[in-house]
Image: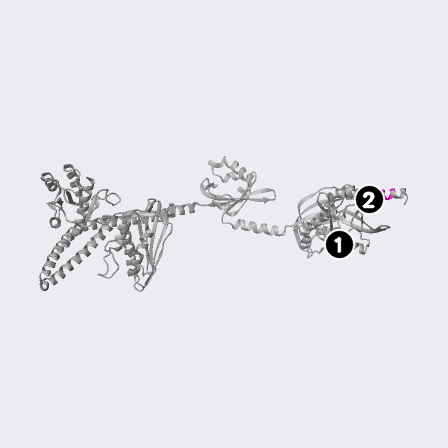
């Protein structure tokens, strides 16, 4: 090959528009042109002698040598765009779609493959854009039609087929007059003339005729089609307004049938539409409102500020539902005003944004709401009054019960102790050989004692109900108390009642008398057993309760704070409402005569109330009964057990002053102490006792005084006695201890009390403990 020929060949390669490279059978690049450098970003020297796989994307690089060898086995010419989508890789790692043509060149040194590579990115993007545009046109809900300036249809999308009823293959090539009614064909010619002059037509309402001959209304926008800088046709976008017209008719019907007044307002505040309800509500005719500023419907006091509020809403026209936090007012034609709820929503209108206001007169609803609130408050007031009346009734009964119990305890103290004296004498007589004569009498006295003890139990229950019983509260675990009596309850209930206990693991401690709380559980379990003679289920569960605003709405008497709740529920026969209302009344019972005292729930009420808690009962016939107990929780640590009672012991000549207005009981006390080594002075009232104290030649070692006495209470006697003899120890005795209790119903620190009726061992133990404490104090 001559030099001139070689130069010409290289010049041809350099001028080629595509990247051209020669590759030998081993895949080594032997030659590249300048377009190859530009396309791939490599310098010529970087490519010559390198493997052609450097220009292959990483994903296809491994398989490329196999394809190359397959081509060399049958090296036929392969034209560019051979139907296989290919890609190439630049020096910077980016990839691009490519068309590659291949041809084999035989040389003395072997076969070379010439590859022409063309980047088809722009062409593919253009194809994709055209496909996307065609898809948009085809998927449009509007009819898109193109025509020549002579009116010949050149394209017709699927929406045009749907709206006009002509398939594209039938209508393309025909004149546009095929869908234009005769009376509008002149208008169509005029429109085409305007389009030819470069004008645009925007949303013109026109009539068209479909394939079935029906007239339809469309909104048409027409634009010129440019090609090579000149107008060659027109493209129209037509929207079928037939359904819109039908919808507008329905809308107008709905507008008129709406229960609320509806007013449509433009951006500048002019009323554009009103319905019949608006006319009725405001008293204006339709013609009187349309075209007027909306402020005619606004009360005069608000009229000046309303335009500013209106502009704010139009600036951010979000829907505002009716009753949106604010009660508004509106004004009628006669000048009267009424409370109104108004909802707002914005609509796109032909002439811009339109705000639709739905207006509702809520006068009757406000009046009804006020009446409901009044009735609700009245019902709540009646409920609270009923609770107060029940509380007052129980309090009155408690005072009565406490007074009765005080007198009974005095009498029972006499009966119990004198019967003990008789029993002692009878026991000695029987031991001396009087078995036949005195055994029966001994048994009779035992019956007297048994009856007196039962009576004493009843008076204690009365005092507990009346919150006049002495309690010894301590910080304790409710769960531990329930667990402690669980086995006893199972034995008490019997096998025919299934007991289920569920304890809250996080239950806080309470301050209460453990013995009394156990008594509450036992009383409730016994009541439940009687309510389930045929067997059933009893559930005792504990739970943490927080008395917040929502809780107090149901239980207003429960003070705010935390509580330990004990819930005792049975599946028994239950009780009607009128019976349940008296369940906590003392001596009220539904049991047959002789089977109940009617003090079980009364005792529960007294114990819980004295502990600062609350108790209520829910019951329905055949639905069982549930009793709920609330006890206020405390953060204090659980207390140690109370120390055991000191044993009874005889005296050593100590002088004891006894003050007891019940002569018989005072004599019993004197006799018990006297025969156990104590010297006793006795008085039946406070002044006499103080006189004995002042006149006594020796120091009185212990003052024992009744709490309730006429003229001077035991507490006053003790205070004045300490004036005459400082430091004198005092032991109170009473079956009605309220005067020596603090506000919490517990004994003041340092106060000792023995409850009536007491037996001889109890009195001796209490006296010994009081004297020992006085000696220890020095």
Pick whichever, 478 or 362, lies toward us. 478
Quarter of the picture containing the N terminus is: top right
The reply to whether the magenta stretch includes residue 10 is: yes
Instruction: State the residue at coordinates (43%, 45%).
Output: 363
Q: Nearer the viewer, mark 1 or mark 2?
A: 1
Pick whichever, 48 or 455, lies toward us. 48
Instruction: State the residue at coordinates (61%, 50%).
Output: 244
Pick whichever, 367 or 412, lies toward us. 412
Residue 214 screen position, x and y as percent: 67, 55
Rate crowding at label 1 as few (under 14), some (14 to 19) or many (20 or more) other CA atoms within 10 Å.
few
Magenta extent: 7-15
Question: Badge 2 is on which residue?
Answer: 16
The quadrant in which residue 533 appears is bottom left
Q: Residue reaching furthest top?
A: 304
Kindly tell me whether residue 83 is visible in this rendering: no
Rate crowding at label 2 as few (under 14), some (14 to 19) or many (20 or more) other CA atoms within 10 Å.
some
Question: Badge 1 is on which residue?
Answer: 66
């Amino acid at each position: 090959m001559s030099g001139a020929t070689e130069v010409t060949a290289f010049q041809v390669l350099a001028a080629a528009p595509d990247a051209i490279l020669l590759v030998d059978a081993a895949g080594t690049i032997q030659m590249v042109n300048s377009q190859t450098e530009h396309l791939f970003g490599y310098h010529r020297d970087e490519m010559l002698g390198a493997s052609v796989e450097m220009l292959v994307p990483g994903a296809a690089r491994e398989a490329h040598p196999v394809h190359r060898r397959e081509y060399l086995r049958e090296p036929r010419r392969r034209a560019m765009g051979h139907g296989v989508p290919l890609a190439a890789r630049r020096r910077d790692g980016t990839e691009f779609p490519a068309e590659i043509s291949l041809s084999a060149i035989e040389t003395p040194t072997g076969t070379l493959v010439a590859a022409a590579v063309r980047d088809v990115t722009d062409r593919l993007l253009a194809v994709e854009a055209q496909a996307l545009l065609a898809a948009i046109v085809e998927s449009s809900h509007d009819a898109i039609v193109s025509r020549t300036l002579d009116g010949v249809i050149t394209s017709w999308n699927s929406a045009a087929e749907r709206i006009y009823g002509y398939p594209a293959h039938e209508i393309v090539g025909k004149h546009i007059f095929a869908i234009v009614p005769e009376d509008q064909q002149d208008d169509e010619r005029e429109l085409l003339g305007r389009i030819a002059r470069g004008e645009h037509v925007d949303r013109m309402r026109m009539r068209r005729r479909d394939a079935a001959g029906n007239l339809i209304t469309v909104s048409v926008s027409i634009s010129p089609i440019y090609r090579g800088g000149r107008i060659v046709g027109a493209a129209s976008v037509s929207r079928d307004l037939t359904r819109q017209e039908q919808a507008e008719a329905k809308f107008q019907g709905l507008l008129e049938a709406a229960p609320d007044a509806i007013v449509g307002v433009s951006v500048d505040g002019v009323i554009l539409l009103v319905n019949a309800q608006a006319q009725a509500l405001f008293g204006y005719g339709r013609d009187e409102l349309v075209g007027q500023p909306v402020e005619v419907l606004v009360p005069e006091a608000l009229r000046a500020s309303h335009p500013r509020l209106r502009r704010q809403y139009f600036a951010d026209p979000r829907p505002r539902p009716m009753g949106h936090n604010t009660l508004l007012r509106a004004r009628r034609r006669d000048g009267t005003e009424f409370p109104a709820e108004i909802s707002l929503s914005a609509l796109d209108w032909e002439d811009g944004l339109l705000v639709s206001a739905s207006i509702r007169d809520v006068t009757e609803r406000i009046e009804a709401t006020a009446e409901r609130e009044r009735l609700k408050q009245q019902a709540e007031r009646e409920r609270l009054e009923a609770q107060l009346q029940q509380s007052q009734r129980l309090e009155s009964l408690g005072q009565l019960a406490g007074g009765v119990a005080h007198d009974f305890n005095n009498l029972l103290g006499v009966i119990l102790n004198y019967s003990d004296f008789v029993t002692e004498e009878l026991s000695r007589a029987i031991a001396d050989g009087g078995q036949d004569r005195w055994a029966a009498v001994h048994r009779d006295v035992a019956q007297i004692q048994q009856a007196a003890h039962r009576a004493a139990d009843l008076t204690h229950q009365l005092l507990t109900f009346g919150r006049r019983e002495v309690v010894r509260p301590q910080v304790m675990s409710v769960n531990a108390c329930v667990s402690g009596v669980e086995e006893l309850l199972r034995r008490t209930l019997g096998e025919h009642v299934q007991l289920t206990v569920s304890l809250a693991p996080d239950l806080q401690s309470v301050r209460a008398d453990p013995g009394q709380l156990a008594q509450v559980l036992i009383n409730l379990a016994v009541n439940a057993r009687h309510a389930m003679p045929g067997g059933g289920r009893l559930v005792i569960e504990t739970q943490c309760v927080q008395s917040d605003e929502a809780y107090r709405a149901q239980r207003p008497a429960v003070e705010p704070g935390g509580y330990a709740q004990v819930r005792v529920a049975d599946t028994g026969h239950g009780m009607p409402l009128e019976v349940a209302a008296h369940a906590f009344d003392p001596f009220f019972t539904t049991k047959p005569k002789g089977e109940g005292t009617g003090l079980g729930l009364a005792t529960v009420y007294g114990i819980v109330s004295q502990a600062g808690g609350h108790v209520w009962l829910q019951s329905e016939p055949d639905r069982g009964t549930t009793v709920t107990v609330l006890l206020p929780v405390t953060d204090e640590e659980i207390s140690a057990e109370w120390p055991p009672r000191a044993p009874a012991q005889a005296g050593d000549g100590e002088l004891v002053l006894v003050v007891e207005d019940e002569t018989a009981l005072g004599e019993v006390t004197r006799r018990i102490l006297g025969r156990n080594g104590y010297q006793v002075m006795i008085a039946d009232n406070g002044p006499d006792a103080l006189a004995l104290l002042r006149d006594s030649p020796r120091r009185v070692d212990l003052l024992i005084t009744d709490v309730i006495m006429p003229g001077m209470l035991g507490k006053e006697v003790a205070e004045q006695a300490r004036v005459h003899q400082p430091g004198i120890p005092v032991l109170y005795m009473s079956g009605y201890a309220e005067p020596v209790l603090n506000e919490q119903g517990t004994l003041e620190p340092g106060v000792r009390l023995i409850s009536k009726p007491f037996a001889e061992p109890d009195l001796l133990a209490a006296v010994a403990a009081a004297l020992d404490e006085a000696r220890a104090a020095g």
